[in-house]
Image (cartoon, grey):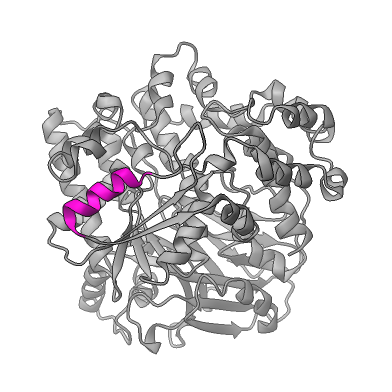
Amino acid sequence: MCGICGELRIDQSRADPADLMPMLKTLQRRGPDNEGVFHQGPVALGHRRLSIIDLSERSNQPLLDQTAGLALVFNGTIYNYPELRKHLQAKGHHFISTGDSEVILRAYQEWGQACVEHLHGMFAFAIWDNNQQQLFLARDRLGIKPLYYAEDKKGFRFASNTQALLAAGGIDTDIDAVALHHQFSLHAVIPAPRTILKGVRKLAPGTTMTVSTSGHQQHQRYWQLQARRPQKALSEWEWIEQIHESLKQAVEKRKTIADVPVGVLLSGGLDSSLLVGLLAEAGVKDLKTFSVGFEDSPEESGSEFVYSDQVVAMYGTEHHKIHVPNDEVLKRLPEAVRNMAEPMVGQDAVAFYLLAEQVSQHVKVVQSGQGADEVFAGYFWYAQMQQAAGTDLDRFRQHYFDRDHDEYLQMVQPSYHGPDYTSGLVESLLAAPGADTFMDKVLRLDVTTLIVDDPVKRVDNMTMAWGLEARVPFLDHELVELAAQMPAEIKMKSGGKHPLKAIARGLIPDAVIDRPKGYFPVPALKFVRGEFLEFMKSVLLSDSSRQRGIYQSAYLEKLLKEPEKYLTRIQGNKLWHMALLEFWLQQNVDNP
């Protein structure tokens, strides 16, 4: 797990490795253990390493094969690398290291761009192919690892986060009007290739990209999720047994493929509690678990310790419980926002940031429960969509969009007005072939698009800010493919996540299984009052905000008068959404 960056000149000049230094400095927190640079002709590659597998210098990057004319920078983990290594050795390939990075290099030698089809894991990497005079980039199937890029007449640059590209300079930082519409309709999800900035783009999940020295680009989608029933019908319990076995394998891979201890982020919910139960079932001893909680508000508890404590008691884990007071949340908020590659409104972003800080003092790798709700239909709005009438878009929009288009037009200045970009995008994604029913379409959209730029990105950004690798077994692509074939009705039984609840019975306390669905609570960012309200006012009424000119004053004044009244359909605070975007721009664009 690391930070990567690079530049390919397309103006016939040589790459200057000094140009990578600002990017590498920005990426240092993602990879505190080693720094490396490679340059050859038009290309320069940079790497910051977090040592997880093969801790020796042999796995430092950039990883080179001068004979083959290849150089690699890689961020992520390949869980099937031991099997791939043996397979490639049998084909005559020789290895100098024992890690997973070199397996990617040899796989590219053997299969070329099709190498990604053989990789099982989370990854973003770039390979300079000197013989072909092209840069090959790839991102894992579910977009667990990030990959951003920018281009101009001089060249093409890429990096693990937006901040690194901004640090290198020359980025068009104007607001992308289409992305802005997505930002405020899909609770800060801006699907690839766009970002909020016109000059920064990102590689889509399950996609590869080649860039030649002439600047020609080619994108290739190598994986698409099919949400269709298999030819052989299965009973409910046959489905659950298959899911159980696939999930056990996913959890086991993410535990054993590491040369350092692996812990669990234990929220107190079903998903992370089940990970603890499955690891215990697999015979793991001395498991380290970590929980975080915040101050209560009159409307909502700020922690789920009452549930996580029961799991800890059941398995006797080495548990670390972290309580964060409200004044600490506000004090540390600027740090968290500076480590967001894109503006993220999820209340738990700062929670993960503060939790990761503590966890990183004990372990380098954790398993986390992200993805379970999307893969197994755990959110309350799925049932609402299922029961709704109208077109597929209508059923989705009325229970998911943060703002309808008319409200959006009232919120932003006329210079950002345009068609209903988000409805058009969602309609096309729902209509794509390969899904049997409406709910299959919804869950596929969530798993392949929406989750990528909400909880998955949030966890990667906030954990890697402390050099902590987060692994997400519920997003193992083989498990996701299996679950996508399961009838949605089975997933939605028992109030959602029925297969996981069935698997969990007997493995974790019933109180955790039968509890109401919880969300990582940070009440101060939902029920906006006191010093948090004053903070948001200071951001939104600042000279920077006025000069930027995104928001209409009448709409802003309406929300400021009653800041707790205006919530989205999934209970996000609309004023916080506005303040977060402006604050992210101030922290990362105005003062990079």
Tell me the residue at 54%/43% (across/down). 346
Q: Magenta residues? A: 304-316
Please state if 426 lies on the left or on the right of 375 as rendered: right
Relative depth, front residue between 356 and 57? 356
Q: Position of residue 585 (x, y in %)?
A: 73, 52
Is residue 139 visible in the rendered image? The answer is yes
- Compared with 563, 22 (above or below) is below
Q: Position of residue 516 (x, y in %)?
A: 33, 31
Tell me the residue at 46%/43% (across/down). 302
Relative depth, front residue between 87 and 273? 273
Q: Position of residue 451 (x, y in %)?
A: 46, 43
Q: Position of residue 87 (x, y in %)?
A: 22, 71
Tell me the residue at 48%/20% (across/down). 392
Relative depth, front residue between 130 and 315? 315
Tell me the residue at 24%/54% (across/down). 312
| Image quadrant where one finds the N terminus | bottom left
Residue 434 appears in which quarter of the rendering? top left
- Compared with 4, 569 (above or below) is above
| Image quadrant where one finds the C terminus | bottom right
